[in-house]
Each structure stands twice: as structure tokens, then as C-alpha cells.
Image (cartoon, helix red, strand yellow):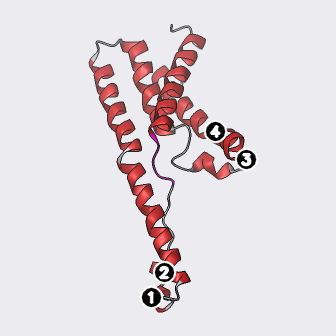
Amino acid sequence: MWFNYVLEATILANVLAQLVKVPLHLLIKKQWKPSLMLSTGGMPSSHSAFVAALATAVAIVDGVHSTTFAISFCLASVVIYDAMGIRRHAGEHAKMLNHLIDDLMKRGNILFFQDKIYQTRFKELLGHKPVETLFGALFGISVALIYGRFLNLI
């Protein structure tokens, strides 16, 4: 893995994006949540940072006219679209289902919820808002450029 700039920049962008979620959440929401380092969703999108760094690093190494850049750009487009589309909507559905279960339990529908399967909470933070994917992509591009400059590749 070492001495593979593309792989290193990609992993570095992902790890840093996950780490920066905690202090950003503290600044914005005034809550300390270290669990965000290991979760999906939130600001910035580590998925977007990961694939944007990949495409940027490939562009630096192989050029924007290469087949590898075309592949990495297409992959980045699909991942970013999925992060702010399908996964975000799945999170919204989870939020609505959790709210529905809470309401039913408050209204005394206890018999329905005696089965443990109906007491399961769904994970709500799955995808990203468009601004989170935008900042994730910009973050990934920046990490790849700064790391490339650090290694004197640019």
C-alpha cells in the first residue's frame, strides 16, 4: 500500500473526513459525539471525499485523458449520487418509521410490540444532504492536491 500515492490520498481523505465530523458537529450542534467517526452520514461526506480524492489523484498520476481517470470519475459520480439520493432517502424512511413506532407505542399498542422484531430502531443517519456531498468532494480534492504537493507530484 505504501508508496502508492493514489491509494494513500484516497484513504487519507476518507480518514480525515471521518475525523473532522466530530469537531464540526461540536461547533454546529454543540454536542460531542465521537461515534460520528465510525458512522455514515453527516458533514462532510466521507464517501464523497473518498471518491473525489481517488479521481483527483488518478488525474494527477495518469492525466485527465486516461482511461483510469474516466473510470474513477464515473465511479465518483455514482457514489456521490447514491450518497445524497438513495441512501439519504432510506435514512428519511428510517426516521419516519421510528417516529411511527414511537407514536404507536405511546398510544398503547403494546400487544403489537411484544415481539422483539418490532422494537428495533432503524439507523437514521445513512446518507447526505447535497451540501454535505459538495463539501466532502471539495475536501477530497483538497486532500489529494495537498498530499500530491507534499510528495512533489504537482
Disc number at residue 19?
A: 4
Q: Earlier in the sequence, mark 3 or mark 1?
A: 3
User: Are there few (<14), some (14-19), or many (20+) residues within 10 Å of tag 1?
Assistant: few
Dot 2 falls on a residue whose secondary structure is helix
Taking the image as drawn, is residue 125 in sight? yes
Q: Which residue is mark 1?
A: 112
Foreground label between 3 and 4: 3
Q: Nearer the viewer, mark 2 or mark 4?
A: 2
Q: Are marks 1 and 2 in contact (CB under 8 Å)?
A: yes
- Residue underneath mark 3: 30
State the SS at label 1.
Answer: helix
Q: Secondary structure at mark 4?
A: helix
Q: Residues within 10 Å of mark 2 (few under 14, many from 20)?
A: some
**Marks 2 and 3, how far apart at CA:** 31 Å
Q: Amino acid at mark 2?
A: Leu
Q: Magenta region: which residues?
A: 125-129
